[in-house]
Amino acid sequence: MTNPETDTDNSRDLVLVRRFNAPCDLVFRAWTDPEALVQWCGPHGFKAVGDRLEAWPGGRHRACLIAPDGEEHWVGGKYLEVEPPHRLVFTHAWERGTGQTSPETLVTITFRESDGGTEMTFRQSGFESASSLAGHESGWSESFERLSSFVGTESEGRNNA
């Protein structure tokens, strides 16, 4: 696993920066509240089912992304840093049918107040191949589109309350 803070070869790092029209605490909660996470996580057409979400250092996470054809994709890992509402660091590995997992990657997300909203910087490092990185880029990009809709809906409901 690479360390994004010290590794100088970032050719296998995925970095996505997104801006949301919602406060940091709401965007952070979308990542750490199990009921919120399943509403937006996964590419278009996928359904997320949470199994475990222990958003504290040393806590575990595990979920299933169910493809439109019903195929299940289980993923899990461990939280290394949880600093509400500004930073999350956790490991990420796909479970394989053999009982093994894919090579572990490291996800680091920072949330920063920006022009009345939130700038989220997402970094996933340690990919075993360029094709794995490309697949994750596509999946996360679609997830973040869903996240934008989710926090927009959530923040509108919250502002009108």
Image (spheres, grey):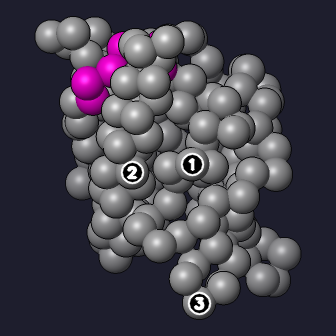
Q: Which residue is mark 1?
A: 39
Residue type at numbered disc 2: Arg
Residue at 26% over, 43% down: 16
Q: Residues within 10 Å of mark 2 (few under 14, many from 20)?
A: some
**Near-viewer residue (7 or 35):** 35
Residue 83 sits in quarter? top right
Percent across and percent down for residue 7 are 35, 36
Q: How far apart are the alpha carbons under marks 3 and 1?
A: 19 Å
Q: Which residue is mark 2?
A: 146
In the image, residue 134 above or below residue 31: below
Whichever of callouts 2 and 3 sits on the residue coming sooner in the sequence is: 3
**Residue 159 as seen in the image, left or right of residue 161:** left
Magenta segment boundaries in residue numbering:
20-27
**Near-viewer residue (114 or 124):** 114
Q: Which residue is mark 3?
A: 69
Residue type at numbered disc 3: Asp
Q: How far apart are the alpha carbons under marks 2 and 1?
A: 8 Å
Residue at 41% over, 68% down: 44
